Image: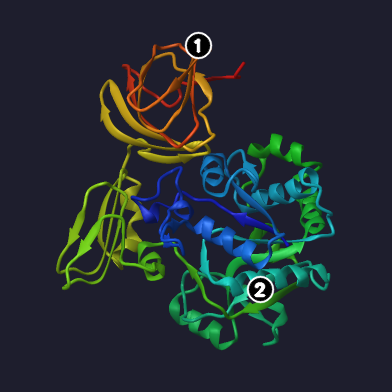
Amino acid sequence: MNIVLLSGGSGKRLWPLSNDVRSKQFIKIFRTADGGHESMVQRVYRQIKAVDPDATVTIATSKTQVSAIHNQLGESVGISVEPCRRDTFPAIVLATAYLVDVQGVDPEQPVVVCPVDPYVQDDYFAALKALGEQAALGQANLVLMGIEPTYPSEKYGYIIPKSDAPVSEVETFKEKPDAETAKGYIARGALWNGGVFAYKLGYVLDRARELLDYTSYQDLFDRYDTLPKISFDYAVVEKEPKIQVMRFAGQWKDLGTWNTLTEAMGEQVVGEGILNDTCRNVHIVNELNVPVLAMGLQDVVISASPEGILVSDKEQSSYIKPFVDKIDQQIMFAEKSWGSFRVLDVEKESLTIKVTLNPGHSMNYHSHQRRDEVWVVISGTGRTVVDDVEREVHPGDVITMAAGSRHTVLAQSELQLIEVQLGRDISVHDKQKFPME
């Protein structure tokens, strides 16, 4: 099975755990069998591999998410990187061209495209495999997954099939309706459109030749910022006469708000938190190293991270986005391909950060022109390189880097250090990378 997972968005509706580089799919909130926690993207990837160990998984995403994907899934997962945001049609074409031109997949092979963040069980991925097999038959150019609606939702578009068979031709599509109109659609046998579909790779490349003058993956990548912003639904789905829909009646949830996310959590408290016995339907998600105590609350979510603290009625939490849009601060936590960092303190001329490097990983060899840096190793072992001079480091060691000096650190075991940046103009843009000699 070839599968493309669409990973986008900043996930502001799950602030303060999400930010501009850490979308909701990277929040580790679901309990695993070994007692740890995994994120949505880790859960979905694990479920795919459980159903089809040989599945080829490609994640279509922006540059800002690549490090987090490598951090959580490793280096082997395929990634189609969008140089900038251009909506779903260019993103899907780029991922399709990546599979054919870069990965060498036969254009006659089917691919399944779906969001990276649904909350589903293993039967969903068995259905994805069946969706791809249906597309391979060539009876239709597109095969959509139609999700059996459980209530008249206003959040989804609707697919109205021509029959109630497991696989049917599509009669028409309906945009997101109000609740009363949705009831009428459901009475006609309508299905939710969850943005899940399958096609033969060559089909979408043919559409791309017509609409985007596609010639190759590299050509598309190089001029990506000039491509029209257009959705896949508008560019392809609404204009395609040969479409089938396959019904899916299993569990399917869009965990886009705190209200829906807490419904899927297997525990009421993640992190340090205490609920007294008068709390009802209260969830705490705490990434800070301080305890959170809740007493006498009902239908409330409490979330704390380096980005901020949220205390909200669960229903009201759905309306968080315009308030978060007004918050202007630097990123306080991020996962990178080499590990992660957490900002501890921000002053006018200093920044203090806790850095964690994964075993065997290193930072880029780089320099800064407008700030000095000091590293204090607090745990683990590794090696630093400063202006081509290498030394082993252990807990308690202090390394200083004057502005302009080239430096990096390589972790042998998990390595934690405190980084203090000193300067009048501290900026993420003040960084120059160099190759290691």
Count residues near mark 1 (Cα–Cα under 10 Å), then give few for <14, some for 14-19, many for 20+. Answer: some
Q: How far apart in space, not on screen, are marks 2 and 1 (Cα)? A: 55 Å
Q: Secondary structure at mark 1?
A: loop
The disc placed on residue 196 is: none
Residue 224 in the image: x percent, y percent?
67, 39
In the rendered view, does 93 fall on the left or right side of 121?
A: right
Q: Earlier in the sequence, mark 2 or mark 1?
A: 2
Crowding around mark 2 (Cα neighbors within 10 Å: few <14, some 14 to 19, many 20+) is some
Residue sitting at 45 percent across and 54 percent down? 24
State the quadrant of the N terminus.
bottom right
In the drawing, does residue 58 fall left or right of residue 375? right
Residue 300 visible (yes or no): yes
Where does the C terminus fall, quadrant-wise?
top right
Which of the pair 258/344 is nearer the observer?
A: 344
The kind of residue on which mark 2 rests is Ala
Q: Is residue 143 visible?
A: no
- Foreground: 14 or 352? 352
Task: Name the residue tied to disc 1.
Answer: 387
Q: Quadrant of residue 333?
A: top left
Q: Amino acid at mark 1?
A: Asp
* Residue 320 location (% of width, % of height): 33, 56
* Residue 21 in picture, x, y percent from top left: 46, 42
From the image, tell me which residue sits under label 2. 127
Q: Are marks 2 and 1 in contact (CB under 8 Å)?
A: no
Q: Quadrant of residue 263?
A: bottom left
Instruction: Give residue 429's position: percent from left, percent from top.
Output: 46, 24
Circle 2 SS class? helix
Q: Is residue 18 left or right of residue 48?
A: left
Above or below residue 66? Residue 260 is below
Q: How was this image coloured?
A: rainbow
Q: Up-down: is 418 above or below 240?
A: above
